[in-house]
Image: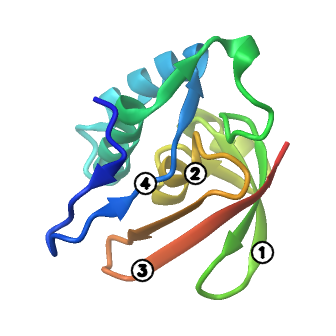
Amino acid sequence: MNTDQVTPHHDLPVKLPPVIFSETDRERLVSVATAALTDRRVSPAASNLLREICRASIVPDDQLPTNVVAVHSHVDVHDNLTGANSQIVLVFPDEKCAKPNAVSVLTPLGAALVGLSEGASVDWCTASGDRSSKTVFRCR
């Protein structure tokens, strides 16, 4: 299923940015997200991650563009609501403690950013109902 639009409860179409995954990241992300569906703490992010995988373009590892957020990417992120910039490293959940500024793919932020290209923005509501909006400023 590769959809460009999702219709939320208020019936206004939302344009989702394209997402791209390498074949290797896709395999591991599916495994990690599927296993996490039974964990109430991370199941919403796992579900979102699986939804992103379903609509993603999948490419061979050596064809993933360098400006796309992949697992282990160092990413400069701009918060579109506060204006703050931050630097993160996107990791699998079992690697979170090993890297400073690590953000797991099983967090709302990690699930939202993985697969995005530089310049892409994504908006979502947090578990508490607050709005969040981020833009990938740079990926390396």
In front: 103, or 109? 109
Label 1 packing within 10 angstroms: few (<14), some (14-19), many (20+): some
Residue 60 in the image: state x and y as whole percent. 64, 11
Contact flag, marks 4 and 1 (Cβ < 8 Å): no
Q: Which mark is residue 85?
A: 1
Gap in Å between the C-alphas at discs 2 and 3?
15 Å
Three-letter amino acid code of the residue under disc 4? Leu
Q: Is residue 47 left or right of residue 109?
A: left
Q: Amino acid at mark 1?
A: Asn
Residue holding disc 3: 131
The tag earlier along the polypeptide, 3 or 4, is 4
Q: Which residue is mark 4?
A: 16
Q: Which residue is mark 2?
A: 113
Horizontal arrangement in the rendering, residue 118 relative to residue 33 (left or right)? right
Q: CA distance from mark 1 to mark 3?
A: 17 Å
Which one is nearer the viewer's eye here, 75 or 5?
5
Q: How many marks?
A: 4
Secondary structure at numbered mark 1: strand
The residue under label 3 is which amino acid type?
Arg
Query: Which residue occupies 36% across, 50% down?
Result: 42
| Outermost residue, right side | 140
Determine the secondary structure under disc 4. loop
Residues under labels 4 and 2: Cα distance?
A: 12 Å
The answer to whether mark 2 and mark 1 are in CB contact below 8 A is no
What element does badge 2 sit on? helix
Q: Earlier in the sequence, mark 1 or mark 3?
A: 1
Q: Quadrant of the N terminus?
A: top left
- 10 Å neighbourhood of mark 3: few (<14), some, or many (≥20)? few
Q: Quadrant of residue 78?
A: bottom right
